Amino acid sequence: MRTERILTEHRRFLATLDHPEQTQQTVLAELLAANGATSYLREHGLNEHSGAEEFRKALPIRTQNAFGPWIERAMAGEDGVLTAERPVAYFSSSGSTGQEKRIPVTPTYMKRCFLPFYHASFAVLLGAFPDLAADPGGVLNLWRDPTSPHARTADGRPHLGLSQIDYRLFGEAGGPGPDGAAWATIPEQLSDADPWERAYLQLRLAAEQDIKVLIGVNPALIAGLPYQLAAQWPRIVEEIARGTVGGVPHTTPDPRRAEQIERRADEYGVLHPYHLWPNLRAAVAWNSALASLYLPRVRERYGPGVRLFAAPIGSSEGPVAVPVDNHPNAAPLYLPGCYFEFADAAEPIREDSPTVTAAELEPGRDYHLVLSHIGGLYRCAVNDVVHVVDHVGRTPRIAYTGRDVLRTVGGVDLTERAVVRALAGALADTGAELRNATVETGTDRFHAAIASALPGPLPAGFATALDKRLGETAGGYRAARDAGALAPVEVLQVHQDAFQREWEHAIRAGRRRTRVKDRIFQPAPDSWARITADERTTADERAHA
């Protein structure tokens, strides 16, 4: 971990918190100065001398996929389309719609925006555990997998996920923060292993280490590891005893460590992470939206002394917010990285939606997020909705509330944030706890699949409580229910491992772990069918009015 770099970038960020207007003006001016002569900006009547008002009036708000024609031109070799620099790589992400994204990555974007953002993000963790700098071997970074296979564009440039980037492309010796210890490299002979096997190999290598910090970022990785460990510990024990990794000789055989792990598993009937790593002290992950409802219970499997640190908020389109304190799920906007705009989330976002600046945000409200940066995205709607919590200095502190996805049934538009808030209320009302949840929309009814975190059935009246809370969080829900246009929500209690099984299924099907995320609305009927295959529904849940 490069301590001085982390602290330097964090200090630079802190210095901007009292100056949001000036910071944003500088970002926009630098963006236009660098890319004012590009085809995209000139096609819209802009140049390096344009101002903020001209910028907002001239350019429509677009999703990343709508930039496709210009990205295609750049990928075909045309210079100066979106950026003055040629992209050296393209970030990929399946996004909310499942469509593959292709996001240009330039050296200047990485050096002035992306890398400073990620370095600054680890300052809070480093402040809590300053000895991490001297003990990089104690960090297990589940999110980083730079040696995994990736695609390339037609002219040979990498097309890959954020977790796969090779920072040497940008003159960096390594990635930001705890980028992974030397022991974590998967043997070259196994480089073509499928994603599920790669997940095992990383866990097998970590099982011999004294892990103190776990980097997950994606909360599904934090939730999935205990499930993975419970299923794979016998194979891990066998390989540690033999000194192999994936069947390949790799380390000195360690029968004592193997016996120790097996003894703990036999004693407790299961092997939790704290049995394997008793000195584990911290985990880093997004702890907002649905994850905020299940991570507190998941954290117990890592040990009572393990602290949960909020990961930076961002997407493949660009950086958004950097933690500065112990707030569990919100962070101030990273204003030095992008020029931000926000549209009221009460209405669907459009090309001409009115927007406000970061300095104009109001605490307690939800907004669509729109960003522009020097890497070649201009007024890009990232399909995320954020909630303004408060301010740090004069900079808004925001929390991610969900994807900008709508499901309509019975004339009612249901959003991810409405479902999460209703679930939170129903959990508080009934004392229930969950491992995960998802929703399927029928023709006249919402169906909610709940994996309980507690043994036994969900508390009596949970469906009634959820129905009532949806009436508070989803506009039009109560009126539709009263008019008979919408049937009561039906709650299906599923197997406690149903969501982890679906997580495993997705990875075995070939998706990288970092891309398998929680879904409030299941995108595919077969996913819903697998999750609910072992459901049990109480009479109370079916018959409530």
Image (cartoon, grey):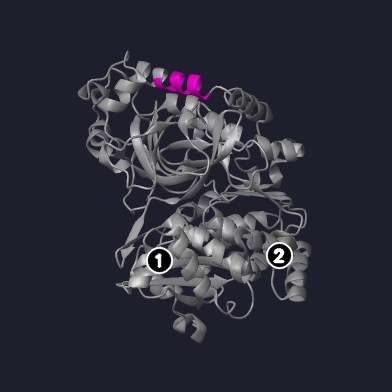
Q: Disc 1 designates what residue?
A: 478
Q: Disc 2 designates what residue?
A: 241
Bounds of the magenta segment: 20-28
Q: Nearer the viewer, residue 371 or 362?
A: 362
Residue 42 % position (x, y): 23, 21
Residue 356 % position (x, y): 40, 32
Q: Is residue 534 visible?
A: no
What SS does tag 1 mark?
helix
What SS does tag 2 mark?
helix
Majority secondary structure of magenta residues:
helix
Name the residue rendered at 64%, 25% in the picture: 11
Residue 510 % position (x, y): 41, 59
Q: Nearer the viewer, residue 498 or 430?
A: 430
Q: In the image, which is nearer the foreground, mark 1 or mark 2?
A: 1
Q: Quadrant of residue 445?
A: bottom left
Q: Residue type at mark 2: give it.
A: Ala
| 181 to the left or right of 153 | right
In this picture, is 291 found above or below 129? below
Q: Residue type at mark 1: give it.
A: Arg
Name the residue rendered at 51%, 58% in the picture: 421
| Magenta span contains residue 181 | no
Name the residue rendered at 43%, 48% in the picture: 149
In this picture, is 260 found above or below 307? below
In this picture, is 175 found above or below 214? above
